[in-house]
Amino acid sequence: MTALLSDVFSAAGPLATGVPGYRLRPQQLELAERIAAAMAGNQVLIAEAGTGTGKTYAYLVPALLSGGKVIVSTGTRNLQDQLFTRDIPTIRKALKSPVKVALLKGRANYLCHYHLELSLSDGRFLSRDDAAYAQRIARFARKTRSGDKAECAGVPENATVWAMVTSTRDNCLGQDCPKHKECFVLAARREALAADLVVVNHHLFFADVMLRDEGTAELLPACNTVIFDEAHQLPEVASLFFGDSISTAQLLELTRDTQLEGLASARDCLDLPKCCALLEKAARDLRLALPVEPARYALQQLEARAGFADGLSGVLCELEVLAALLETQAQRAEGLESCWRRATNLLVRLQAWQSGANPDFVRWAETYSHSLQLNATPLVIAEIMQKQMSGHPRAWIFTSATLAVQDSFSHYCAEMGLGDADSARWESPFDYPRQALLYAPRNLPDPNRPEYAEAVVEAAFPVLQASAGRAFFSVYLAARDAPNARVAQRVAAARRTRSAFAVARRAQQERIARTLSQPGQCHPDRQPEFLGRGRCARRSAVAGGHRQAAVCAAGRPGTFGAYRETPQRRPQSFPGVPVAARSDQRQTRGRSPDSR
């Protein structure tokens, strides 16, 4: 395949013909050749390639030419959509490849007919907006083929109504569901089983494949190659899914579903609503035992917190009572039986977390705005990963821009159980000393604080002004819509004709992508992942990250795997902006054993 790859990536090849502005990069071709060799020999390859190498095309081209079944796992659902809707179609068209491609997401991304009907028949929603959204979703359900909630443009992706009309691993009835034949999740999985290339994300890979979720587990034995993009995220994701997590949100979902099933099949059981109400109160009290601000807590911190131990005991007591009552009602309906099984399962897992019986797991907790999650994480995942990777011969490709520590992959290999796997790294083709400037503002508030977003804007605004409009600004806003709007107005007030403000929500990716070609637009949205991987279409980038902002003052990183030649210039001095570090002082990011 090496000779074929040379032709594909050549300056006169199909990519050059099919991708506007394409430019041959030796690093990209070398990476593609190493990946193709690993695929042919069913080997493990760890490949680090700097931003701008074109990793996406470097692994997609061999994947499409291999002739075998390939699973591509990305870091986020946003990157899934980018691969499925843009990168893969572009390469398929250029190569004239007949390969069948499927996109597979977690079940919570697909509308559930059963839970939609149950919620509509109950008619009780958290707000008037949710009630109106439910009617839009019902209309969407009658015309959609995929059931993917991302396609339901009239309903925000973060609307609370989605939890009422989608299923989870816990409340899915499986083959007992009366809507089993119409299930969107099963339809998506059937398409994935029949596809040559399946695009998933790390969370789905570990949740549905590693935990042998029904149906999805068949994907792994059938494939010849697994490619992990953004592989630096794997240790943390794998630790979470190889461990166990129980959240107060799961308990609240259990009480909600139990009440709905009780109304449908056990109205005469008057104790059921009472037990649900008591468990719901106990779960909320447990969350309130910890501060409101989202944070992570070690076991010692939890034990020292007044009210936590009593709150956990209260939840266990009420959950045990509800499980016993549901057992007496389980035979009346499949839904009630499912709730009984869920309650029993949650009780066993919660008791195991409380006892800490497994010394190989570390217990900790994480709080969110409205929920508390109790986690038991394995101290070492290497042996578990080795077990998952053994058996059926296949190639495993791990690629990212940040895998090595001081040019060594030993830490990553040890953490992931990869032994002495083949590894290689390539520097970015970008001329960072001439094209980029790194600016790290000091004394920013904590990212969880409501004033964080505006503080980032104030710190970065002089750079935006000095760039004379050649800037793309992105900041993650943990705050809600009103602060978002104020920040958007602050940036829009500059009236720079070629500036764009975007904190992208995944459901609006395509609209924002179109906007980037129309100067002077402003979008106060949220999700930051859309802006990752150096794919902004402007000449420069300003990113508000965790306690720092980065500025690319000149140059252009290219789009969608292609490199476009642009005039190079040295970054100008920005008045009033202290330069914390020049980009030619390369910082190697790695993971320490304590960073999980």
Image: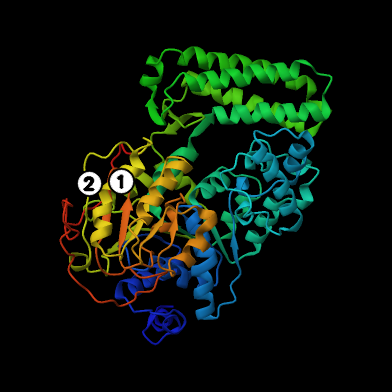
Judge by depth and name the residue closer to the eye, 361 or 52.
52
Residue 456: assigned label: 1
Q: Residue at x 66, y 56 (%)?
A: 188
The amino acid at mark 1 is Val
Residue 126 appears in which quarter of the rendering? Answer: top right
Q: Is residue 499 left or right of residue 218?
A: left
Callout count: 2
- Residue 26: x, y in percent? 30, 75
- Residue 301: x, y in percent? 36, 20
Position of residue 173 relative to residue 284, above or below, is below
| Mark 2: few/some/many CA within 10 Å (<14, 14-19, 20+) | some
Residue 151 appears in which quarter of the rendering? Answer: bottom right
Position of residue 36 relative to residue 401, above or below, is below
Q: Is residue 454 left or right of residue 227?
A: left
- Tell me the SS state at disc 1: helix
- Residue 496: x, y in percent? 33, 63
Judge by depth and name the residue closer to the eye, 358 or 464.
464
Location of mark 2 (residue): 441
Q: Residue at x 58, y 17 (%)?
A: 316
- Is residue 304 visible in the rendered image? The answer is yes
The amino acid at mark 2 is Pro
Residue 399 appears in which quarter of the rendering? Answer: bottom left
Q: Are marks 1 and 2 in contact (CB under 8 Å)?
A: yes
Q: Is residue 468 left or right of residue 292?
A: left
Q: Residue at x 42, y 27 (%)?
A: 364
- Residue 419: x, y in percent? 34, 50
Q: Earlier in the sequence, mark 1 or mark 2?
A: 2
Colour setting: rainbow
Q: Is residue 371 left or right of residue 416?
A: right
Judge by depth and name the residue closer to the eye, 472 or 580.
472
- Tell me the SS state at disc 2: loop
